[in-house]
Image (cartoon, rainbow, N blue to C red):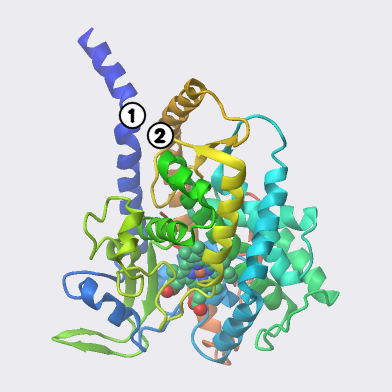
């Protein structure tokens, strides 16, 4: 009898211990496969006070070559990781690509906000006039940003086919990054083919960098920056922001009642990106020795890993508390707050556009709905932010909302159990696959940092190089290894 009670107790308590145990195991397996690499800062040598100085150091400028970690990043962001702006080594090719990205993202604030509102309205209209709807906020946001970035790249409204291709691509990237699915390279290749067709027809109204010499490189550049990173990051950021509001009815009510309160919404966005920065770690490879004085130095070739959550948790009173009002008395410039990276070392090119567009979409959502959620909220947000949307003009009785919240809480706990096991399996598989494929390492055996073929490079073996077609781990086929950030 006691044994039976104990077994039931263990089974019922699974959601409280299994996911954590599996995540711990996953981290150990990844470390085992990848081997020791990198210096994670802040640490006891470079504390939070010198973190930004090290990040901004001119010799902390290598992005891909020479770090085993790059293989993993390249694997997840395939296809075309070698021309993704995030992975380009410094030099003329990077400069040209960065200039082009900034030009495509440029625009007046009013015009960008209006475009974001339009895209949100179109997608929210599709929810229909029904009663309340259960959604996953990240999924809800994906088509909004697909339409928005399609508009910036092609300067025309987004047709349904293109939207489908972009969302399929972006979802596949982020799901594999979170280890909740394997990669499906066929889905990503469909978008590449579409972009190649549009480029061949002369339908991309921007001057693309001459340094990207082939149509495929240009297609991969557009795909990587705008239909992968941009769509994924904005959907994740909005999922965090809306989930924060869904869990805090008072805050939500305040913002909904004062839609012009830029300051209040700005505080909530600052605090959300502080507690849930989209980057866990950004890495750099030192191109020369760095000497910070006081006996602190790093030889050339060191992999520096900048830990965003750790940095964002220092320099604040009660950093673990979500407190948007703290920003009434803090300046973003002086606080330990780098949601878009550091200005001196390859910051996010969307640092101006992203907050503008997020404000516009948040206002459109709050104008139409009240949001309700009781799920957990972590930086990696693998559950894609389940939430109940209730039309503002048709409120639900309190007891019905309470029942839905109870359901969401319970489902979240149990989903966590299954998902953590899946993440362990998929994650281990992909880390091993990336290790075997070594996309970045193999690329640099044959190319210099500006993408020029090395004369001394041995002829390529079939099936190995970046861009070669092979069966993808998700079962599809498509361009071989590519890149992305490390697993959450
Ligand atoms: C709220 C949304 C976003 C956040 C919080 C964010 C955050 C960041 C951060 C922290 C970095 C720098 C990492 C490092 O130092 O290596 C970065 C880089 C980058 N982001 Fe964003 N991002 C967002 C949206 C976007 C969007 C909309 C785009 C559109 C193209 C974009 C494109 C890029 C690119 C291309 C880089 C690499 C920059 C370079 O190496 O030159 N991001 N982002």
Residue closest to the eye, 329 or 271: 329
Whether residue 183 is visible to the viewer of this picture, yes or no, is: no
x, y percent for residue 362: 55, 53
Residue 370 visible, this orientation: yes
Residue for badge 2: 417
Q: Residue at x 45, y 57 (%)?
A: 431
Residue 203 falls in image quadrant: bottom right
**Does residue 293 appear left or right of residue 358 in this picture?**
left
Q: Are marks 1 and 2 in contact (CB under 8 Å)?
A: yes
Q: Which mark is residue 14?
A: 1
Work out which residue is located at the far top of the displayed protein and give it.
1
Image quarter hosting the C terminus? bottom left
Residue ID at (78%, 64%) = 194
Residue 145: x and y in percent read 64, 58
Regarding mark 1 in the picture, which secondary structure is present there? helix
Q: Closer to the N terminus: mark 1 or mark 2?
A: 1
Distance from Cα at disc 1 to Cα at disc 2: 7 Å
Q: 136 or 12, which is in the foreground?
A: 136
Residue toward you, 254 or 252: 254
In which quadrant is the N terminus drawn?
top left
Q: Which element is circle 2 on?
A: helix
**Would residue 414 appear left or right of 169 to someone viewing this image?**
left
């Amino acid at each position: 009898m006691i044994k039976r009670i104990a077994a039931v107790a263990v089974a019922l308590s699974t959601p409280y211990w299994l996911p954590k145990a599996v995540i711990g195991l996953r981290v150990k397996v990844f470390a085992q496969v990848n081997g020791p690499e990198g210096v994670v800062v802040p640490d006891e040598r470079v504390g939070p006070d010198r973190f930004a100085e090290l990040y901004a150091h001119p010799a902390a400028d290598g992005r891909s070559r020479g770090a085993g970690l790059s293989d993993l990043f390249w694997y997840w962001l395939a296809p075309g990781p070698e021309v993704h702006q995030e992975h380009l080594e410094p030099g003329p090719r990077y400069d040209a690509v960065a200039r082009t990205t900034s030009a495509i993202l440029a625009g007046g604030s009013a015009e960008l906000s209006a475009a974001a509102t339009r895209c949100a309205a179109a997608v929210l209209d599709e929810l229909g006039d029904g009663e309340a709807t259960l959604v996953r906020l990240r999924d809800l946001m994906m088509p909004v940003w697909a339409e928005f970035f399609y508009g910036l790249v092609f300067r025309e409204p987004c047709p349904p086919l293109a939207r489908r291709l972009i969302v399929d691509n972006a979802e596949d990237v982020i799901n594999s990054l979170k280890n909740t699915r394997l990669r499906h390279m066929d889905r990503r290749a469909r978008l590449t083919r579409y972009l190649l067709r549009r480029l061949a027809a002369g339908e991309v109204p921007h001057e693309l960098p001459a340094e990207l010499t082939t149509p495929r490189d240009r297609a991969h550049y557009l795909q990587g920056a705008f239909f992968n990173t941009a769509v994924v990051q904005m959907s994740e950021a909005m999922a965090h922001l809306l989930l924060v509001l869904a869990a805090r009815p008072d805050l939500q009510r305040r913002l909904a009642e004062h839609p012009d309160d830029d300051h209040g919404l700005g505080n909530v966005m600052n605090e959300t990106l502080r507690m849930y920065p989209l980057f866990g770690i950004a890495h750099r490879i030192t191109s020369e020795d760095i000497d910070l004085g006081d006996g602190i130095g790093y030889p050339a070739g060191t992999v520096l890993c900048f830990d965003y959550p750790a940095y964002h948790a220092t320099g604040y009173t009660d950093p673990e508390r979500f407190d948007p009002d703290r920003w009434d008395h803090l300046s973003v410039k002086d606080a330990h707050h780098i949601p878009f990276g550091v200005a001196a070392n390859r910051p996010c090119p969307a640092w101006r556009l992203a907050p503008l567009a997020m404000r516009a979409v948040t206002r459109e959502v709050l104008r139409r709905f009240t949001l309700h959620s009781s799920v957990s909220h972590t930086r990696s947000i693998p559950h894609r932010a389940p939430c109940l949307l209730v039309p503002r003009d048709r409120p639900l009785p309190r007891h019905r909302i309470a029942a839905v919240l109870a359901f969401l809480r319970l489902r979240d706990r149990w989903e966590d159990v299954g998902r953590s096991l899946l993440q362990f399996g998929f994650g281990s598989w992909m880390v091993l696959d990336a290790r075997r494929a070594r996309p970045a390492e193999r690329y640099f055996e044959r190319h210099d940092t500006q993408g020029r073929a090395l004369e001394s490079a041995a002829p390529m073996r079939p099936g190995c190089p970046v861009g070669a077609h092979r069966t993808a781990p998700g079962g599809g086929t498509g361009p071989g290894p590519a890149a992305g950030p490390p697993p959450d």
